Image (cartoon, rainbow, N blue to C red):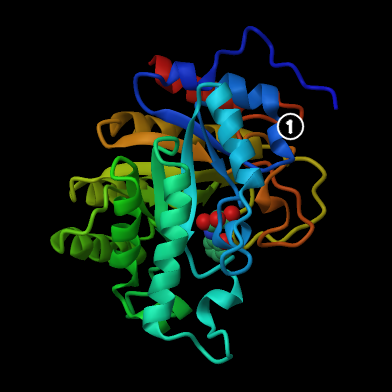
């Protein structure tokens, strides 16, 4: 496969933000090859989009499959990049066996927690010293209604302290790794307060948690910039680190379900550039708290948003276009670092 060469007059994104925070990208085994040059030039952190999730690392009890995760670690170390680990405990992409008894029926609490411990201990120890931060628990907070925690098998079987347990097991396996609670809709005021309450209660109990991951799956209108600022302020008031973990800016508003666009419409890329500029100005302003900003991809040739939430719809959410060339969004972000 031919590599698309970045132009020399295009400054390196991560070097430009060196004084402020790491700049990362999510990768997969395909993009690790197809985006190799772009990744090594512009990013100093990588995250596995899928390859470190429970279902990928331990598809059957006791059978661990580390090949793709190891490849990512090798890529990062050979290019002097850091690695953010994603994710140890989540209600999705976790195999059914985890929650079932070997003889059938649901697993009991003790069995489930023993499996959690063995998974976390095996994975975190393997990459000890190589992964600077782990998303320990992903998306445990409920989006809707009065309930704090989302219904899940982890919650059903182990009870609400499954969250604290996951952090304790991870901390025991690598005391130097920074441990994060990670979630989406993190800037929506109602959910923000739930995330705040959860993390505050963990801190109050002395649970080893070091930060909050703001997924930041945003679009041209939402969330409002002021809601992002308030979320940063609220989380930072807990005295924890903040990582922006899965940043992308969809060019479609939530109600827009069109599937026929072959390229971005007039105005979309300009609006996206304006939004990216505003967001990075905020991240820079709060660089005492925000020390890592990871995109959920690197360039518009591949994004999970190409099929989610509208099937068969292309999206263009990043700073680099499908040919790995800088978009107006890229230049606005670079301008932020220089101003
Ligand atoms: C994230 N969820 C996950 O953290 C990440 O692991 C995955 O690759 C993509 C996005 C966001 C999300 C979702 O998957 C479904 C509904 C809402 C939000």
Q: Which residue position is annotated with label 1? A: 33
The reply to whether residue 214 is visible in this rendering is no
Report the front residue among 215 and 58.
Answer: 58
Q: Residue at x 34, y 45 (%)?
A: 174
Q: In this view, does 193 lie to the left or right of 109?
A: left
Q: What element carries label 1?
A: helix
Q: Please, is residue 334 above or below residue 211 in the view?
A: above
**Residue 170: % across, % down:** 35, 54
Q: Please, is residue 317 above or below residue 322 in the view?
A: below
Report the front residue among 250 and 293.
Answer: 293
Report the front residue among 165 and 90.
Answer: 165
User: Number of callouts in the render?
Assistant: 1
The reply to whether residue 220 is visible in this rendering is yes
**Residue 233: % across, % down:** 24, 46
**Residue 294: % across, % down:** 49, 38
Q: Which residue is drawn at 50% across and 26% down?
A: 81
């Amino acid at each position: 496969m031919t590599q698309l060469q970045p132009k020399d007059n295009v400054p390196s994104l991560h070097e430009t933000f060196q004084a402020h925070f790491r700049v990362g990208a999510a990768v997969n085994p395909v993009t690790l090859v197809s985006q190799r040059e772009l990744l090594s030039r512009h990013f100093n952190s990588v995250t596995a989009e899928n390859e470190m999730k429970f279902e990928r690392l331990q598809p059957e009890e006791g059978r661990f499959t580390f090949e793709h995760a190891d490849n990512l670690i090798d890529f990062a170390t050979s290019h002097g990049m850091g690695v953010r680990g994603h994710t140890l405990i989540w209600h999705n992409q976790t195999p059914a066996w985890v929650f079932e008894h070997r003889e059938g029926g649901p697993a009991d609490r003790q069995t489930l927690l023993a499996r959690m411990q063995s998974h976390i201990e095996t994975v975190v120890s393997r990459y000890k010293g190589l992964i600077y931060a782990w998303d320990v628990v992903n998306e445990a907070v409920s989006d809707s209604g009065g309930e704090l925690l989302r219904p899940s098998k982890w919650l059903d079987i182990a009870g609400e302290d499954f969250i604290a347990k996951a952090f304790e097991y991870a901390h025991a396996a690598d005391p130097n790794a920074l441990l994060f609670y990670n979630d989406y809709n993190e800037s929506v005021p109602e959910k923000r307060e739930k995330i705040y309450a959860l993390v505050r209660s963990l801190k109050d109990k002395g649970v080893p948690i070091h930060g909050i991951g703001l997924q930041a799956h945003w679009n041209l209108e939402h969330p409002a910039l002021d809601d992002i600022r308030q979320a940063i302020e609220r989380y930072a008031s807990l005295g924890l680190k903040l990582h922006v973990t899965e940043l992308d800016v969809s060019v479609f508003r939530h109600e827009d379900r069109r599937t026929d666009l072959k390229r971005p419409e007039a105005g979309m890329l300009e609006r996206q550039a304006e939004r990216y500029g505003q967001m990075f100005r905020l991240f820079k302003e709060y660089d005492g708290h925000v020390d890592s900003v990871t995109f959920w991809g690197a360039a518009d040739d591949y994004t999970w948003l190409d099929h989610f939430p509208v099937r068969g719809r292309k999206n263009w959410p990043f700073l680099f276009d499908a040919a790995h060339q800088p978009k107006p969004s890229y230049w606005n972000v670079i301008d932020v670092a220089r101003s």
